[in-house]
Amino acid sequence: MRLLIVGTMEGPIAVAGKIAHQRGAKVSHIDTISGAMNVLRSGQGIDLVMVDVRCDVADLINQIKLERINVPTIACGIGNDADAAVRAIKAGAKEYIPLPPDAELIAAVLQAVTEESHNIIAGDPAMKAVIDMAEKVAPSAASVLITGESGTGKEVLARHIHRKSNRASGNFVAVNCAAIPDNLLESELFGHEKGAFTGAVARRLGKFEEANGGTLLLDEMSEMDMRLQAKLLRALQEREIDRVGGNQPIKVDVRIIATSNRNMEEEVRNKRFREDLYFRLNVMSIRIPTLRERPLDIKPLSEFFAGKFAEANGLSAKTISPEAMQALQSHHWRGNVRELENTMHRAVLMAPDSIIGPDAVVLTGQSLNNSVASGGMANTAQAIMNAGAPGGSLVGKTVADVERDLIIDTLQHCLGNRTHAATILGISIRTLRNKLKEYTDKGVNIPMPGETGRANIG
């Protein structure tokens, strides 16, 4: 854990930094917002930013978003300054830590930032075999290709490999190739020089340089544009990269782990993925089984998520009833562990007491499993009818309207998670992203991650 503290390093903030250091964090400090941005651009692998509310928190968070730097930010300040705390949260800070700091609160925040990437639950023999293989591969320098359906935990396994590798003391840097537009992904990976393009206000190191000496995860690798695949292949072969707008190659020492939810050999056959790059990445291949193939993990995962979300929402511990567990274990789980996580989040919030009963376990999308999976968006209208909509209610609607309704409803079911929704719909994340852009341009209110409210379709 690498913590960057922004603000005057004195008094209570200095104490907070000392506590974080004692709890295992590597702490660095900078006085100003501009200085903090320079640190974040320099690829030092900062995991968490803690900023004094006496600084312009909103300005820092806006700059981080503008430059697409993926790092959580928390605010801290004198405990009785409620107005400053509210302003910081409204500006986008994930948490507010009152000062003087409480050691356990600091520890809890540090743990919350890292727990998702560190927890791996594998009790089923099918998953234990995967973990065994991963740990055998981990000490080597070989590239690893992790495949499996969306939501199976590919990034979690990648982080586990990094922690067990000889590069564990180096940075683990992840980049989601599906979530970044093609015209920006090159800069994200290789960095850019000041003025290289509109918006390049300063030199910024890319993910390759940030991961130098460590591990770089290329998440959903199969979504990368063919032109960029060629540049990536050169970077892997030559062990050097070129910043956008730069004129000098830069040597890098990076171990690559790539993931995909697609059949990569089929992608190669269909000329959507370079064969030479595929073989360069596929030195070691690990397939993560679906949750349907590892049923013995459903119970421990459900209990883990129930405890996690009860604590996160300030609720007392909740026990899953046998009837509720039976419902969980008999569900198809098209969205795998991610769908289970969302289901347990809802269940914790809906359970009226300390017992999670079957009424609190909302399992949706069951009737969509076969129709959507077999026909994708071509069977959209039939999928909605199978889901229980009266046949006459579709009369008068265009196919485009029905398709839009299905996409939006599925996105709401997934709490705004694009990757999960694309999996349930049977389409690529790129297709979903294009559809959502089209709807946004028409004024449709699209659910963002974490939102459950009905979209305004007009």
Image (cartoon, grey):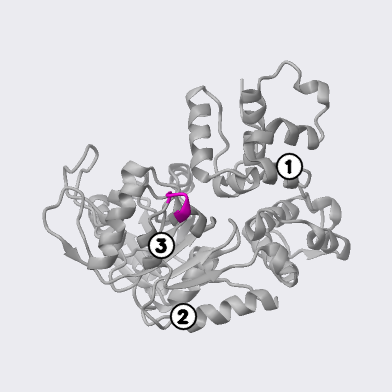
- The amino acid type of the residue labelled 2 equals Val
Highlighted magenta segment, given as a residue range = 268-272
Q: Hey, which quadrant is residue 6 in on the image?
A: bottom left
* Residue positioned 31% across, 70% down in the render: 254
- The amino acid type of the residue labelled 3 equals Tyr
Q: Hey, which quadrant is residue 302 in on the image?
A: bottom right
Extreme residue toward the top, this view: 396
Looking at the rendering, in which quadrant would you find the C terminus?
top right
Name the magenta segment's main secondary structure: loop
Which residue does the numbered mark 2 point to in the structure image?
A: 137
Place of residue 304 in the rendered image (x, y in percent of width and height, measured from the top left): 68, 68
Secondary element at image label 2 = helix
Question: Disc 2 or disc 1, which is closer to the eye?
Answer: 1
* Residue positioned 34% across, 50% down in the render: 54
Mark 2 residue crowding within 10 angstroms, few (<14) / some (14–19) / many (20+): some
Q: Are marks 2 and 1 in contact (CB under 8 Å)?
A: no
The disc label shown at residue 278, or none: 3
- Marks 2/1: CA distance? 39 Å
